[in-house]
Amino acid sequence: MSVNQFIDNEVKSNDVVLFMKGTPQFPQCGFSGQVVQILDHLGIAYKGLNVLESDELRNGIKAYSNWPTIPQLYVKGEFVGGCDIIREMFQASELQDLLKEKGVPVRADAPA
Amino acid sequence: MAISDTLTGKLNAAFAPQSLDIVNESHLHAGHGGHTPNGESHFRVHIVSEAFNGKSRIERHRMINELLAVELRDAIHALAIHANTPAEAPR
């Protein structure tokens, strides 16, 4: 399976996927860590894929998304953005709306 | 030429911004992956331009990422982007 097929399969078979540096339990980059904090705060179930474990994955996701930086968040197969976009969307409650729209459970008591 | 000057020049030329503020945050990342000895590895850009009218967040970032593709690939490790239109009056 090529890396492109691997990525395609991951983003299509998981509701929420975060390509990141490090793991959700132990982020190894501040930008990845910020997105982890937001997702955890919202109580989102997601799969973290550590690009530091594979140069092929790290370069592959940049090409797949046509996006030069990590982290990258996918919801239901759709690229949502990197750290700045996720934070801005969260602050404007747009991220919460997008997740609900796509049928991803968001913790009810998370502040809007 | 300092990398920050290159970024400023390219962004000014491409987007004729109403305001442009490039913050070098490299010192915050000393000792962390991607930090480089020249002290020009991590930047934050605040840009306000009419060019972003009608563009989604992803489209705005793509416009900037494409303009600075060479720098992102070869010279800088991280670029935080805040791109707004004048009507959005950030901060």
Image: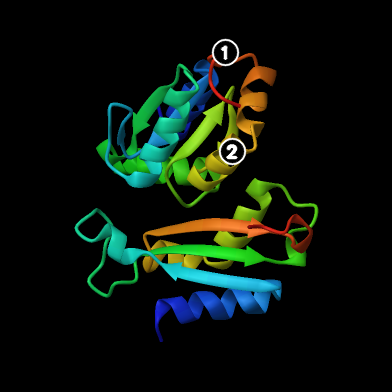
- The residue that label 1 is drawn on is A108
- The residue that label 2 is drawn on is A91
Residue B43 visible in the snapshot = yes
- Left or right? Give the position of A25 relative to B7: left
Image coords of residue B3 (percent x, y): 42, 77
Query: Considering the image in quadrants, where does the C terminus of chain A appear?
Result: top right
Q: Is residue A94 above or below residue B65?
A: above
How many dots with numbers?
2
- Kindly identify the residue that appears in the image at 57 percent across and 13 percent down: A108
Going by the numbered disc 2, the residue's amino acid type is Gln
- Kindly identify the residue that appears in the image at 34 percent across and 45 percent down: A30
Question: What's the chain of the residue with tag 2?
Answer: A
Question: What's the chain of the residue with tag 1?
Answer: A
Image coords of residue B33 (percent x, y): 25, 53
Depth check: A66 or A43 in front? A43
Q: Residues within 10 Å of mark 2 (few under 14, many from 20)?
A: few
Q: Earlier in the sequence, mark 1 or mark 2?
A: 2
Callout 1 secondary element: loop
Depth check: A62 or A4 in front? A62
Q: Is residue B38 above or below residue B87?
A: below
Going by the numbered disc 1, the residue's amino acid type is Ala
As drawn, the label of residue B11 is none
- Left or right? Give the position of A80 relative to A4: right
Callout 2 secondary element: helix
Image coords of residue B31 (percent x, y): 19, 58
